[in-house]
């Protein structure tokens, strides 16, 4: 089944791994994806010495709910439980008894997910007790956005914020003739339950806009690769397409000719790709065109596209990342953090049912630490998707180790109110307000032989799928699953676990302190540049002076952003005493001598965390050196090379940040360490 050479990096679908392949298996199910499951099973048994057999002989039986009664009886597993009849199409049941088991998919798609669940278990038959256990995804939408360009963009390269070489899909200005790696990628996605993929950058340049028209055949071919894995394809579209591609004088959503241009463009897509998913749109943001240009609202713009897609069952993912990127840094009244809430909450209830508003998890831009975006809790009559960034733009660019699942778990469990109030996940899953928008994330893969630049960054992709399926899974268990699936050698797994555990906090320690964010080199966003954005139009400031640092976002004296939260958060964030340490400088401008809850002053915290972060990276490197010989090549060397770069970069961060704040404040380190 795997189209890759046995020596290639298969990521977590290691062909030599699963115990499932030693079983006697039967597949008796209905639906188009059953062929995919059958091919997976055949492949596993060939590798591992198991075999396919009739149902009554098999130890593991794979079926779908419509056939469950007959198949379970034949397998000696009795009558199906009532819950089996109620399975949703993506859900599956595992039925155990008499040393055998059956996986029952709610549909062929549920079966595919059930198959991968079995594959993950080290000992499928030895696991769990007799009876029926139900698995269903929490978020129905589990989507990846690619920021791939067809051609190499002169500034952004081929993949915008991509750190894994060029695009997996396109090469030399066209679709790759050999799509075997995309085929494997699609398997990887299905194995963690991803069911949607958008194929191109949200900043849609001239050439990429034509994926909608002249280059539609490329989309057709990619859809053919993703379809057998249950993944629907989407396109990012440019709001001005009726002008740039259609030659119309306007892209005004109220214009009849514009509407009919979109309707016929969409019709052509569905003629070629009947299961096409829909559009992703970045409008009126960072130079992209949008409805504001015509005096229309974002609801007008989104609904116009939604109405073109609705007859075919398509949907629009409309991004809430809209802010003024031409701000005057002298203007203290404009706060980029406020922008999405100010733009979108007045539109609650105005979006069509097939519009999903896609909101970044924090109010700024995927920083290592941000508060949860208040927009997510403030639009109960709108389908909302949470947008995460798997690609590590601001978290080390896949040169640094930064396992992000702990951050995502925190976000997903954030309650909009007291502890029992609906969480981010409740909103995204539709449990708090119906219907749901889901989880969308920017992908981190590329043409790189290890898929993600840093091989350990594969774990972030894995974790994204697993958390979107079940946000209750602890980040540590997801890491253990990934390690077990990825590395055969136990000492390598232990080393990788110790390197990756806490790596998010480590990255935070040596970069921008206490939630203040940015301090990165403008443009490419790698490495330290404390004042890099300070006097620019981008709205990302830290306001450090000789007395203190941080952004006053209080209602009383600042930008008022804290007031966008419901209680108790609005009151908690309003006061420095009740703001969590890690977000202090996001909400408050405080003196360097301000004492944190930890008991340290802000300045001493900055020094201590920056020294500690580098020490931790030194330990990571030493840990890997101890097991490097046991790890597969060339992965082992790639990890070492990246860890060495992480050490170099962490030292650079430590010295620039510490020196900057020492020079501003004049306060020495109380431990007398070297600051320049
Ligand atoms: C960030 C990123 C851009 C990207 C943008 C977005 O600002 O740096 O490259 O286009 O996010 O999410 O649209």
Image: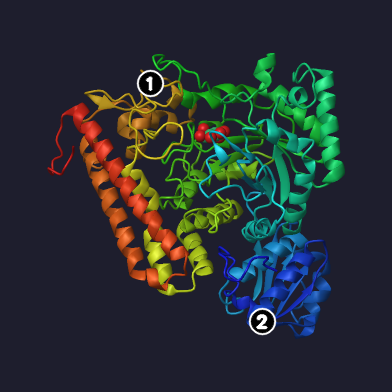
- When the figure is inspected, residue 240 is found, relative to residue 640, above or below; the finding is above
In the rendered image, residue 491, in percent from the top left (x then y), is placed at 39, 72
The numbered dot on residue 315 is none
Q: Dividing the picture into quarters, in which one does residue 208 lie?
A: top right
In the rendered image, residue 619, in percent from the top left (x then y), is placed at 29, 59
> Marks 1 and 2: in contact by CB < 8 Å?
no
- Going by the image, does 461 lie left or right of 209? left
In the rendered image, residue 547, in percent from the top left (x then y), is placed at 22, 24
Q: Dividing the picture into quarters, in which one does residue 211 lie?
A: top right
Of the 4 image quadrants, the one containing the N terminus is bottom right
- Residue drawn at x 71%, y 24% as measured from the top left: 240
SS class of the residue under badge 1? loop
- Residue drawn at x 71%, y 33% as measured from the top left: 209
- When the figure is inspected, residue 647 is found, relative to residue 70, above or below; the finding is above
Residue closer to the observer: 646 or 214: 214
Colour scheme shown:
rainbow
In the rendered image, residue 409, in percent from the top left (x then y), is placed at 49, 49
The numbered dot on residue 23 is 2
- Going by the image, does 505 lie left or right of 216? left
The numbered dot on residue 535 is 1
Residue closer to the observer: 306 or 41: 41
SS class of the residue under badge 2? loop
- Going by the image, does 84 lie left or right of 337? right
Nearer the observer: mark 2 or 1; the answer is 1
Total marks in image:
2
- When the figure is inspected, residue 481 is found, relative to residue 206, above or below; the finding is below
């Amino acid at each position: 089944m795997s189209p890759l050479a046995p020596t290639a990096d298969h990521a977590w679908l290691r062909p030599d791994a699963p115990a499932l392949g030693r079983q006697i298996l039967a597949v008796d199910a209905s639906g188009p994806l059953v062929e995919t499951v059958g091919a997976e099973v055949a492949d596993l048994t060939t590798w591992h010495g198991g075999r396919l057999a009739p149902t009554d002989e098999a130890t593991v039986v794979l079926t779908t709910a419509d056939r469950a009664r007959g198949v379970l009886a034949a397998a000696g597993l009795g009558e199906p439980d009532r819950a089996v009849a109620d399975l949703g199409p993506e859900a599956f049941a595992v039925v155990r008894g008499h040393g055998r088991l059956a996986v029952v998919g709610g549909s062929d798609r549920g079966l595919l997910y059930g198959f991968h669940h079995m594959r993950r278990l080290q000992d499928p038959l030895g696991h769990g007790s007799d009876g029926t256990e139900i698995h269903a995804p929490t978020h129905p939408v589990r989507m990846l956005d690619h920021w791939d360009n067809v051609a190499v963009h002169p500034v952004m390269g081929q993949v915008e914020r991509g750190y894994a070489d060029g695009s997996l899909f396109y090469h030399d200005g066209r679709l790759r003739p050999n799509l075997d790696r995309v085929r494997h990628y699609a398997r990887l996605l299905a194995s963690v339950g991803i069911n949607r993929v958008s194929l191109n950058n949200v900043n849609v340049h001239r050439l990429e806009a034509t994926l909608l028209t002249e280059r539609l055949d490329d989309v057709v071919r990619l859809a053919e690769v993703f379809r057998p894995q249950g993944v629907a394809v989407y396109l990012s579209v440019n709001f001005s397409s009726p002008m740039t591609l259609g030659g119309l004088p306007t892209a005004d959503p109220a214009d009849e000719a514009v509407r009919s241009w979109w309707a016929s463009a969409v019709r052509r897509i569905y003629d070629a790709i009947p299961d096409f998913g829909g559009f992703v749109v970045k409008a009126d943001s960072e130079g992209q065109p949008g409805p504001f240009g015509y005096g229309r609202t974002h609801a007008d713009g989104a609904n116009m596209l939604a109405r073109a897609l609705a007859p075919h069952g398509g949907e629009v993912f409309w991004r809430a990342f809209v802010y003024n990127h031409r701000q005057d840094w002298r203007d203290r009244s404009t706060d980029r953090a406020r922008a999405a809430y100010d733009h979108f909450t007045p539109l609650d209830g105005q979006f069509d049912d097939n519009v999903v508003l896609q909101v970044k998890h924090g109010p700024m831009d995927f920083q290592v630490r941000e508060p949860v975006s208040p927009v997510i809790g403030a639009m109960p009559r709108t389908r909302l998707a949470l947008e995460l960034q798997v690609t590590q733009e601001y978290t080390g660019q896949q040169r640094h180790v930064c396992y992000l699942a702990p951050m995502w778990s925190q976000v997903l469990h954030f309650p909009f109110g007291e502890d029992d109030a609906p969480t981010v996940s409740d909103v995204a899953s539709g449990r708090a307000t119906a219907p749901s928008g889901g989880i969308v994330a920017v992908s981190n893969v590329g043409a790189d032989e290890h898929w993600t630049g840093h091989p350990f960054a594969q774990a972030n992709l894995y974790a994204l799928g697993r958390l979107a399926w079940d946000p209750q899974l602890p980040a540590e268990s997801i890491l253990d699953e990934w390690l077990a699936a990825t590395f055969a050698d136990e000492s390598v797994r232990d080393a990788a676990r110790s390197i990756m555990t806490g790596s998010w906090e480590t990255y935070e320690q040596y970069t921008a302190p206490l939630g203040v964010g940015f301090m990165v080199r403008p443009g490419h966003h790698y490495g330290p540049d404390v004042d890099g954005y300070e006097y620019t139009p981008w709205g990302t400031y830290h306001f450090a002076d000789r007395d203190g640092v941080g952004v006053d976002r209080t209602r009383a004296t600042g930008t008022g952003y804290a007031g966008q939260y419901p209680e108790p958060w609005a009151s908690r964030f309003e006061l420095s005493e009740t703001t969590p340490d890690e977000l202090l400088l996001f909400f408050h401008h405080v003196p360097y001598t301000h004492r944190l809850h930890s008991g340290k002053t802000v300045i001493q915290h900055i020094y201590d965390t920056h020294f500690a972060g580098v020490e931790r990276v030194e330990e990571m490197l030493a840990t890997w050196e101890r097991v490097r010989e046991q790890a597969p090549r060339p992965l082992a060397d790639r990890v070492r090379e990246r860890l060495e770069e992480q050490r170099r970069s962490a030292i650079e961060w430590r010295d620039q940040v510490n020196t900057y704040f020492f020079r501003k404040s004049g306060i020495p380190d109380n431990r007398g360490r070297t600051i320049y």
